[in-house]
Image (spheres, helix red, strand yellow):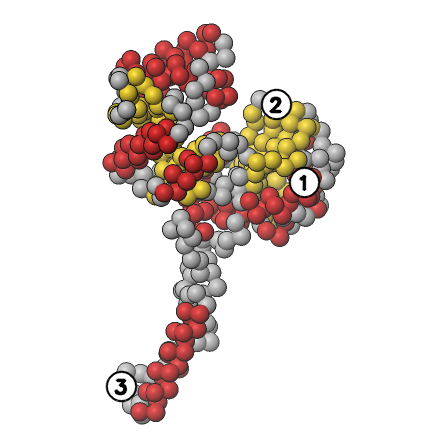
Amino acid sequence: MTYTITKPDKQQFGIVLDLMLDGISSDPSSVAALGKSWWQRLIFRYLFGPRMLRNQMDTFVALRNGQVIGYLIIQFEGETAGTFDWAVIEPLDQEGIDILGDLIEAALDSAEQRGDLPLAYFGMQNSSDPRIGHMLAEMGFWKADYQMGQMRATLPLKESPQLPAGITIKPQISARFGGNLPEYVRMDFDLPDGDDDMPGERTIAQDETHEDKPMADEALTDEGIEIAVAEALAEAEAVIAEGDGPNHQEPDRSGFTLAEQVDAICTLHQSTLRASKIYLVEEEGEVVGMIQQFKWKEELRLLLALEPFLWGTETEQQLVAAMPAYVGKRDGYLRIRTFSSDHLAASRESFEALGLRWEDAPWQRWIVGL
């Protein structure tokens, strides 16, 4: 049977809110927290929810015979458009996948028409049907290497030392940190700082001057011309063989280089800064990374971005072990994540020695350029 994708009317808005509160959602546990008591449910259903969906987001519904069979809510944060919530009531057979795909297409078209958003992302739980990932890849999305794993433990840890010798922590103003974020995220992906020479650029050394090169009016013999041409060709071939320089990166299947993917991750991550605390990590006065702190219920959440030479070291281990006491959290739970998968993999054994246990992060984030 056919279905249509459209923006909801007032009654359909209410149906979407009821579905969310009834757990028909891409994130049932978080939405359930919005209506955990009868009065919170009423406030979300009739006041906060309608205002949020109409003023801050775009909502799309799939209708069959006038009945809502799926919805997708997209929110706008900074330079990104991302899914706030989505669900398909129909079974996720091929038609259910198609319904979700059409909802996503409608949301992307809406975001693209704004003209000021370079990126969109789709979030889903790791337990979601893998066919959704295949569909997203066919639509041009790529799966971001972004907080894909985590390590958790009950506090206190097996060790709770002081900060390592030579390490200092400097709190930052989170709301003003956005412009500095890319520098530290690039650390966690072992990329050079964005201010370094771009791939393929060539600087002139101090002892290299134009005096070494013949002037335009300087006569050249045929032999000199042949030598100059041969040298130029050899230099060009060397550049090609090196891939346009030591920092050159080829796009992967996403069509983006790693540096471009990291830039997209930074854009996506900007919206989290306001709800967190940021600390710079310095070693002997040199900045070597950052820690982002979140508190969620009884859990202390730390997101690390550190220079690769610290991954898996005793210094990093002691830093992580000291952070709960440093921020005043002595019981409950600790969760550690890193921006890149490589960082967490390199540090896993070291963190396990503190009693932390590795697990998949609950969410995947898929990104597409608009």
Q: In the rendering, which numbered label is found on residue 298?
A: 2
**Residue under pointer 1:** 351
Question: Where 58 falls versus 337 (above or below)?
Answer: above
Q: Is residue 252 above or below residue 23?
A: below
Name the residue furthest front. Answer: 1
Q: Amino acid under label 3? A: Asp
Residue nearest the observer in this picture, 176 or 317: 317
Residue 144 shows in this picture: yes
Q: Residues within 10 Å of mark 1 (few under 14, many from 20)?
A: many
Q: CA distance from mark 3 to mark 2?
A: 77 Å
Residue 89 location in percent, x, y? 38, 21
Q: CA distance from mark 1 to mark 3?
A: 67 Å
Looking at the image, which residue is at 29% across and 87% down? 218
Q: Quadrant of the C terminus?
A: top left
Pick the residue in front: 263 or 365.
365
Label 1 SS: helix
Closer to the camera: disc 2 or disc 1? 1
The quarter of the image holding the N terminus is: top left
Look at discs 1 and 3 and give the one toward the viewer: 1
The 10 Å Cα crowd at callout 3, few under 14, some 14 to 19, many 20 or more, is few
Q: CA gap, disc 2 to disc 1? A: 20 Å
- N-term mark: 2 or 1: 2
Q: Is residue 309 above or below residue 54?
A: below
Q: Hey, what amino acid is under mark 2?
A: Glu
Amino acid type of the residue tagged 1 in the rendering: Phe
Which numbered disc flags the more N-terminal residue, 1 or 3? 3
